[in-house]
Amino acid sequence: MASSSNAKHKRIAEEEEEEEEETLEELEGFDDFTLASSWERFISEIEAICRVWMVDGPKNLVEKGAECLGSQKKLYKVKSEMKHGTKLYSIEYYFCVSNKGKASFWDDDLHDLQLSFGVSDFMVIAPLSASGVVLDAPESTKLLSSVAIALTNCGSNWPAFVPVHDPSRKAYIGIQNLGLIFTRRFDADRIGSHVPIRLMHLEGLYELFISKFALYSVDFSASFFKVQFAMKLTYRSPPYESDDEIASVDPEVNESKGDIVSPNRIKTHWDDDCPWTEWYSAEDPIRGFELVAIWSGRMFESSLEMAELENASSFDAGKWLLCPIISPFMMDDSTWMFVGFASQIRLLVSALDMSFEAQFLDDFVSAENPASDNSKLSTAIPPPTVLDRVLKEIFHDGGHNSHHVERDNKHSRAIKGAPLESLFAQFCLHSLWFGGCNIRAIACLWIEFVREVRWCWEESQPLPKMPSDSTIDLSTCLIHQKLQMLAICIEKNLSHDTHNSTESVDHTPTGKKVDAEVDPFKEPVKDETGSFLRSYCHQDSEPSTSSSFKHHDYSIRSPDLQKVDQVRKGSAGVVRSMMLLHSYQKMHAPYTQDAPIMTEDMHEERLQAVEVFGDAFSFSGQLERDILSSDMSAFKAANPDAVFEDFIRWHSPGDWENDDTEGCAGDGNNWPPRGKLSQRMSEHGNLWRQIWNDSPPLPVLEQKPLLDPIREGEKILHYLETLKPHQLLEQMVCTAFRASADILTQTIYGDFKPMKTRFNQLYITLASNLKPLQADNLPEKAELIGDLRRLCLVFEHIEKLLIFAASIHRKLLDVPRLSEAMFSDYFNFYLPKMGTSLESICYDQEFKTKQLVKMHERDAVASLFPPPTANQSWRKVLSMGNLLNGHEPILREIIFSINDRVEDSHYGSSIPMATTEEIQTHRMYIQGTSNDLWVALSVTSWD
Amino acid sequence: MAAPGGNKIRNAKLVLLGDVGTGKSSLVLRFVKGQFVEFQESTIGAAFFSQTVAVNDETIKFEIWDTAGQERYHSLAPMYYRGAAAAVIVYDMTNAASFTRAKKWVQELQAQGSPNTIMALAGNKADLVEARQVSVEEAQTYAQENGLFFMETSAKTAINVNDIFYEIAKRLTRAQPVQNPQGMALANKPDQRIVNTSSCCS
């Protein structure tokens, strides 16, 4: 060692030269005798590398790109290579950053060697061979000495390890200088099979540890050993999918037959009551749980105590930690393993991509189309039987869903699709799972779908799964609007037909109703509906035929009234407290036509026309003028003696100024009503008055309808039948996204906050990214498809997370705190994967974050480990103790250690540490099961 | 469609909503033609106007839809406010009922309209101070609570009429670049494309 110190000084002066410069020195002919032998050169090479690392310090090394190990980013590794003789060696330095204070020696993030030998920073030297293990004993010893010498030269006290034997044994030897006096030696080895029975039990292991220093020439007598003991037991809950056969058969069935639910499905799936099961069955993302029970910091004095501990219940352990075992499909998305809405929508996006190739959907179905022979698999159309069944499901099934309350989800409405339960949304969802969701299958389904819709139209059958209100929701996609309109047209046709056929018979009951309304003529009129009555022209409330009933009342008052009443047509009843100005009669509100309903393209057309004609007033209000005129005609018919002012009082009350002198707005007895038209209405040449003058008295039924249901219905069918493929697919993509999100959002998962936020974000993301699809001028196709694929990926992440959330929620139903904590652990672990790139990141890391189980939660957690059935328990011979509900730990880890008070008698004051400090003299780490034992021993000596 | 930078003209659909006789048409007429007619004829249905406003280096061309206040036309309103970049909800400050009606319009827009629509509340007929029924504070508070901006206007004296349209134009130019602050970003998305997609949705 003294000889090398010379070289050491020199090199310090040179400020850590690199290897290359050393070789340069040699070339220059400077013959450093300390580097005479190749072995010495090897040592100095190691030394040089170590110095660089030492000088850099952890911070710089991290900046220079040290490799990070473990999920908690505490441990880093730097690596170098060198040659000795014909062999290449790698030298690795592992170091910890930040918190020096070791929280626990059971830290999950510890490297194997840290855990086994109780070290923090360390070095490993290994030959660069296939196995990475030094095979012969002299080589390993030599290697270790080289490192030891090099490290001593540097004044470093890093422990160094060399792997020995064959890799399966995970055997190491190692050495560490502790100041000048102490040296720690490390040794580890493994028995892979046939573990002696004695070593299966705690008692035997304890004795093994004792024997390590009883051999030693220290004057302890065996009875005073105070051995520190810590133990960690890992249990694994039995797998949920214990019936492997069915689990492996099922997906195939689903694939080959579309979404047929195989009749012989005996097994209930974990997600049977989850909202997505109507469409697919998700693999359970949680395979099971690992429970870690830790006993720590106990002192033992005899092997008897150890034997007792082996019988202790795991409930006695100081600490319980729980960790879910995540199914690989959650992490590995590179192979498109996950089948769910996201995967199907991705196919739909591909279909959209293809859809630009043809002008008509029929082109995809016909065989001659060149687009169809790209590949046989992706263009298959399911057989007609499947087609029939799916159509039936779209049109007739789902009665069980009809009562489903449409949630008014604002986020969902922002996506321009069809509402979840509507006909078109069901069509989209079914096509996702129809065949391979390729363009040909979709085209085929669509053509049949439209055929079915036409049948409904021609047979006047109400369209199923359409909202019943007679307005059109303009926030939905155009196809849905068209279908809504068609449903209304069918309804109108139907009511028209029934009206014609029943008109003659229904006057009696309605007549009575009107009679009752008119009757209060003698009494004050009750406030019934509002300022005016507005009704719809339903067939059953048409009172025009009931004049004979009213006749009795009126005839008492005035003989004239009879005449008036007989010409009155289309009245919906009297307007409360309103008398006509020029005749002593109650004002009747007429039935009026529904304001014509329009889909957004009709609106668009209208608005565009107006914009083209500019400020031409006469055009812009045409529709409204028609309505006004219709209203006026109806009003005139219902009130034959009315004047323009009466109409204004009813239709636009704001334009009638009552005289203040008039008493309380009473029962209309102070006739005639006093007041005047607003200034603007009484101007000369007022347009309203002109229209009034031009409008003939006509009840609604005799008017030309504002909306021609037959013409509009035919137009809609024409639209559906000639829809361009890409227009269909665009709307399908939007609707599929929206409907899938709406289904998933019904999942019960305990409303974990990060999940909830993410899901809302998903809606916003969908809404904003699907917007380009509604624009008239589409962005560039490649761009659009790329964006949609990325959107699918985002969707897939959220879908997976949601399934995970649902799974963990139902498994840990009794311990919501725990499930939420575990979800957010997993969420944070998963987060870096999300929204990063189209190419998915494959994690090499496993999810290992454990959650501390609180005392009161232990019972619930233990119930994850149901006592094994007779069938299961027979398979295993239980040989380790500490059973949990009859389950043996899958892994037992033990650390024995013994401390000794160091005496400073040997080398006087040169000991670097305080003289009274206790140091760990022996430490043994044991890891294993009943047939696998790995032991690592570290011994500190001062010889 | 508007590209960022450069003096481009951007079209913006604007709709006026409010009760009968609150002065919607008068406001538009004042803004578009600088005229005021004491007794503006009651609008039948809707009327269309256009007017441009220059803000900084951009020009906003308002396509204004002036709707009728009568209840009868309510069901037609969605087609006018659908896809509108801005909505001006007008009430008559001498008429408390018209303020109530204005609130209903705000509610409806919040529920049915696009979330990006800029909403302005105009208390019209501000010249008739002695007949005031709706206080400034009340309207101001309501506007703040609902994220509207508020001005009292007078089509007769032209107070605040141009201002309210100018303010809308200013907000339109400001609002455009922000796409979806709360959503997730898609990966690998070149920046200029984000701008493209955002400008075709107005």
Image (cartoon, helix red, strand yellow):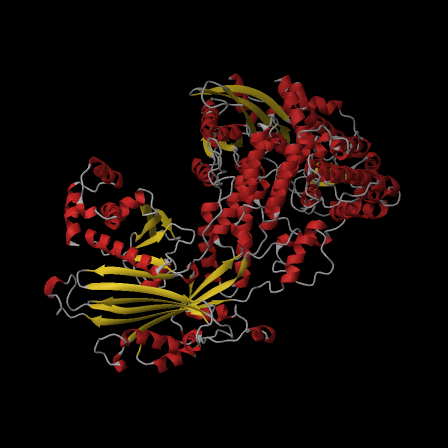
- Quarter of image, res A137: bottom left
From the viewer's perspective, tell me whether residue A532 is left or right of residue A288.
right
Report the quarter where the N terminus of chain A lies: bottom left
**Residue B24 placement: quadrant:** top right
In this rendering, does residue A144 appear at all? yes
Q: Is residue A497 above or below residue A316?
A: above
Out of A576 and A868, give the one closest to the viewer. A868
**Above or below for A171 versus A81:** below
Q: In the image shown, does A809 or A60 lie closer to the viewer? A: A60
Pinpoint residue A868: horizontal percent, then vertical percent: 56, 73
Q: Position of residue A52 (x, y in %)?
A: 25, 45
Labels in figure, total: 0
- Residue A447 is left or right of residue B134, and the answer is right
Q: Residue at x 46, y 41 (%)?
A: B145
Above or below, A304 against B2 in this view is below
x, y (%) of residue A197? 44, 77
Left or right for A383, reference A669: right
- Residue A599 visible in rendering: no
The residue sitting at 76% across, 32% down in the picture is A362
Q: Quadrant of the C terminus of chain A?
A: bottom left
User: Which residue is nearer to you in this view: A758 or A550?
Assistant: A758
Q: Position of residue A109 (x, y in %)?
A: 38, 57
